[in-house]
Image: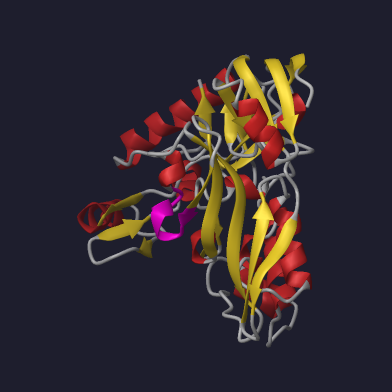
Amino acid sequence: MTILENISLKNYNTFGIDVKAKRFVTIHSVAELQDLLSREKELFLLSGGSNMLLTHDIEKLVVHIDIKGISIENEDENFVEITVNAGENWHELVLWCVENNYGGIENLSLIPGKVGTCPIQNIGAYGVEVKDTITKVTVVEIETGKLKTFTNKECKFGYRDSIFKNDQKDSIIIVAVSFRLSKKNHVFHTSYGAIETELTSQKIDFPTLKHISDAVIAIRKSKLPDPKELGNSGSFFKNPVISSNHFEKLLQKFPTIPNYKVSETEVKIPAGWLIEQSGFKGKRFGNCGVHEKQALVLVNYGNASGVEILNLAKKIQETILEKFQIELEIEVNIIS
């Protein structure tokens, strides 16, 4: 375990923001992490860097979690429970599960980042949330260095939310996540988004896990930029949930507004539609902008600072609030 100094974090965040870490260390095991915690408490945790916007240099010790490994904990003829260490690449895990005929996370294909960050914001896509498969999350307490386990219920999962974004923020480090996945009689989620259309276009009537995964990958590639080619952090804003009364008023002014009923009193509106209707889609503002194919994605054209991207986000929020009386909430973790 070697602590490096004055390291650029440009290659450690998917936005490609060039800020520096005063000190930087990569952790490969729980034992290494516990050893570090016996000496250091003021840490800045960095995994895949896929859900953050860095706006300044980092003074704290930057800890890059790179603990690898997958193990099968329990298995019967219907289900398998696997434990995956935090440093594993999320998309590679999905592909591994599909290859082994383990069902439950195929709709979450091609989401950037590492396994350790997936419970924090309860990643989701195409009608599936990761909370539906997580059985437990294993963490190390920063204060004590001890291992602790959170059950699914204790994680307090919500829409893009969990206890790790709230009560446990800055007090624990996720080192492993356990999942319960199906081995047969898989439940396919194909009605959300364009999955069904994609399967129909390929003339697939009886889809497999791989068919679903391939369809999601094709859809995401057609809409979302590759962070290796154009810096971004995926969806920058949450889809807002508004009251049914508010929605009825908006419907009178905007009859084509897309919507998803959440409950008898709440409706979810696609944030991308709101941004597009406000004229931001495909627009460039200096070194950053809004992606031409997906208005939910803010992009770095090469030399943008985190502050530039954050200012664009604030401009979008102000416009949406004025036009639709909806407060857009940022999904990406802003390091300010």
The image position of residue 57, as x and y in percent, is: 63, 14
Residue 155 covered by magenta stretch: yes
- Please say if 288 is above or below 139: above
Q: Nearer the viewer, residue 172 or 331?
A: 172
- Residue shown at the point (65%, 23%) measured from the top left: 62
Question: How are the colours assigned in the image?
Answer: secondary structure
Q: Which quarter of the figure is the N terminus placed in?
A: top right
Q: Is residue 92 left or right of residue 294?
A: right
Residue 286 visible (yes or no): no
Q: Is residue 224 left or right of residue 229?
A: left
The image position of residue 216, as x and y in percent, is: 67, 64
- Please say if 323 is above or below 245: above
Residue 333 visible (yes or no): yes
- Count of marks placed on residues: 0
Q: Nearer the viewer, residue 227 or 52?
A: 52
The image position of residue 88, as x and y in percent, is: 73, 49
- Please say if 72 is above or below 62: below
Q: Nearer the viewer, residue 186 or 31?
A: 31
* Magenta stretch bounds: 150-161
- Residue shown at the point (68%, 79%) measured from the top left: 200
Residue 261 covered by magenta stretch: no
Q: Is residue 180 left or right of residue 155?
A: right
- Please say if 295 is above or below 128: above
The image position of residue 41, as x and y in percent, is: 55, 22
Q: Nearer the viewer, residue 82 or 203?
A: 82
Q: Quadrant of residue 83?
A: bottom right
